[in-house]
Structures are given as C-alpha cells and as structure tokens.
Image (cartoon, rainbow, N blue to C red):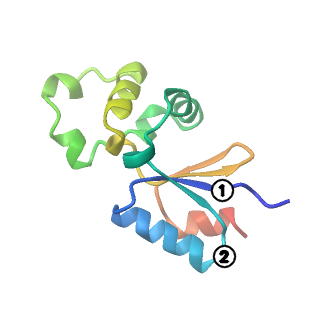
Amino acid sequence: MAKSVTIYGIKNCDTMKKARAWLDAHDVAFSFHDYKTQGIEKSMLEKWVGKVGWEILLNRSGTTFRKLPEADKTSLDEAKAVALMLAQPSMIKRPVLDVGGGALIVGFKPETYAAQFR
C-alpha cells in the first residue's frame, strides 16, 4: 500500500520548489498544502511540535522571525512558538513532509528524502 505523502509550505519558497522537484523526479506522488492559501490548524501544528519539537519547527533564521519585536523573540517556549507560527505560518520551517505512518521530515535535504523513499 502506497504511503499518503503531503508536503506543507509556501508555493514560491525556493526550498519548497527544490523539495517538490525532488519528489517529482523520484516519482513520489504527493499533495501540497500551501499555508498562504489554506492556513494551518492549531491541532496539526501541536501534533508536529509533539513529534519534532517547536525548536526544530520554528524558523528563526527567516525574515518574518527576524522582523519580530525583541519582546516576541525572547523567552520563547512551546506555547509562544505555536502562537507565533499560527499567526504567521511563514515562521514554520519549510518544507514539512508528512509521509504517513507517523514519519515527519522538517526541512529539505536530498539524502534524507532518498533514505525515506528507498
């Protein structure tokens, strides 16, 4: 039985384009969930945080995070990080690849994808 693969991110993100191109080149069928048009449910975000941790999921190097007021960037904890990512989904590290069966890959590295889809 084939895995149900969903890739989450933002359509025009360069890393997303690379990840989708890799999946296409390796004949991995997937559905794409765009945060900009579809948003993200709090329950989904909390599930991801439970699997990989908010520290992995929160993109601190992106422009959106760097432009936050200092008060929003200090004393981060899980609740505050989830609230920030819900308010501005572009702060979620991209892509998030849900390969079903509980496997979740955050970010794009060709070797990680290759290991997942052998």
Q: Quadrant of the N terminus?
A: bottom right
Q: Does residue 88 appear to the left or right of 34 in the view shown?
A: left
Q: Residues within 10 Å of mark 1 (few under 14, many from 20)?
A: some
Total marks drawn?
2
Q: Residue at x 32, y 31 (%)?
A: 87
Q: Nearer the viewer, residue 92 or 41?
A: 41
Using residue 118 as the reference point, say whether residue 24 is left or right of it.
left
Residue found at the very far front of the displayed protein: 37
- For this view, does 5 lie left or right of residue 44? right
Q: Position of residue 84 (x, y in %)?
A: 32, 29
Residue 14: x percent and y percent? 34, 66
Name the mark on residue 5: 1
Q: Gap in Å between the C-alphas at discs 1 and 2?
A: 12 Å
Residue type pointed to by label 2: Asp
Image location (x, y in percent) of residue 113: 59, 65
Q: Earlier in the sequence, mark 1 or mark 2?
A: 1
Q: Answer with left or right where residue 117 lies relative to residue 36.
A: right
* Image quarter in which the C terminus is found: bottom right
Q: Are marks 1 and 2 in contact (CB under 8 Å)?
A: no
Crowding near the residue tagged with mark 2, few <14, some 14–19, many ≥20 C-alpha atoms within 10 Å = few
Label ID, residue 73: none
Residue 110 vertical placement versus 43 (above, below): below
